[in-house]
């Protein structure tokens, strides 16, 4: 079985716990080590700061309990950690400076999410 994310530690930042678990299962089927889910903005920032050396990628929900996850995105970009936004809205819902980052429309399709995290195109 092909495991394009084999051994990579991928953090899931998602405020809907069941969606987060589903994303982790999807990542683990691709060989990743699923971390989280983390559902609150402050917890996500703290997690990234504490584990920056071991995180290989992040699946980042744009809206966390009514707060934009942009501070997490900024931290990840500063540290050079790959991340993919997830959202139920189209790219126009993102602030303009974040539109160039990979985005997965919810519900996320496994092949699209995995391609974005592995740096390949679908």
Image: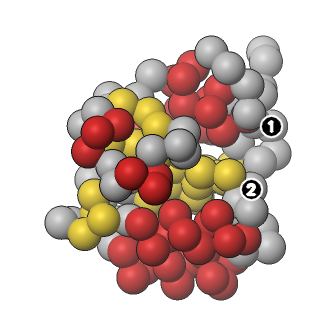
Alpha-carbon span between mark 2 and mark 1: 11 Å
Quadrant of the frame with the C terminus:
top right
40 above or below 9? below
Q: Which residue is mark 2?
A: 56
Q: Residue furthest left?
A: 66
| Residue 74, x across and y down, in percent | 54, 69
Report helix, strand or loop for mark 1: loop
54 above or below 103? below
Which residue is at the front of the view, 88 or 93?
Answer: 93
Q: Earlier in the sequence, mark 2 or mark 1?
A: 1
Q: Residue at x 54, y 23 (%)?
A: 112
Q: Which of label 2 and label 1 is nearer to you?
A: 2
Which residue is at the front of the view, 40 or 120?
Answer: 120
117 relative to 15 in the view: left or right: right
| Residue 49, x across and y down, in percent | 63, 82
**Residue 44 appearing in the image:** no
12 above or below 71? above
Q: Which mark, by number, is residue 110?
A: none
Quadrant of the frame with the N terminus:
top right
Report helix, strand or loop for mark 2: loop
Q: Which residue is mark 1?
A: 6
18 above or below 55? above
Q: Residue at x 26, y 45 (%)?
A: 93
């Amino acid at each position: 079985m092909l495991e394009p994310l084999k051994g990579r530690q991928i953090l899931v930042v998602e405020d809907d716990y069941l969606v987060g678990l589903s994303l982790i299962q999807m990542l683990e089927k691709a060989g990743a080590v699923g971390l989280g889910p983390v559902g609150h903005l402050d917890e996500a920032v703290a997690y990234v700061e504490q584990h920056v050396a071991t995180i290989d990628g992040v699946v980042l929900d744009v809206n966390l309990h009514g707060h934009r996850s942009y501070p997490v995105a900024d931290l990840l970009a500063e540290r050079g950690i790959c991340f993919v936004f997830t959202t139920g809205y189209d790219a126009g819902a993102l602030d303009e400076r974040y539109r160039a980052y990979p985005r997965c429309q919810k519900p996320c399709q496994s092949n699209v999410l995995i391609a974005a995290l592995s740096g390949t195109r679908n």
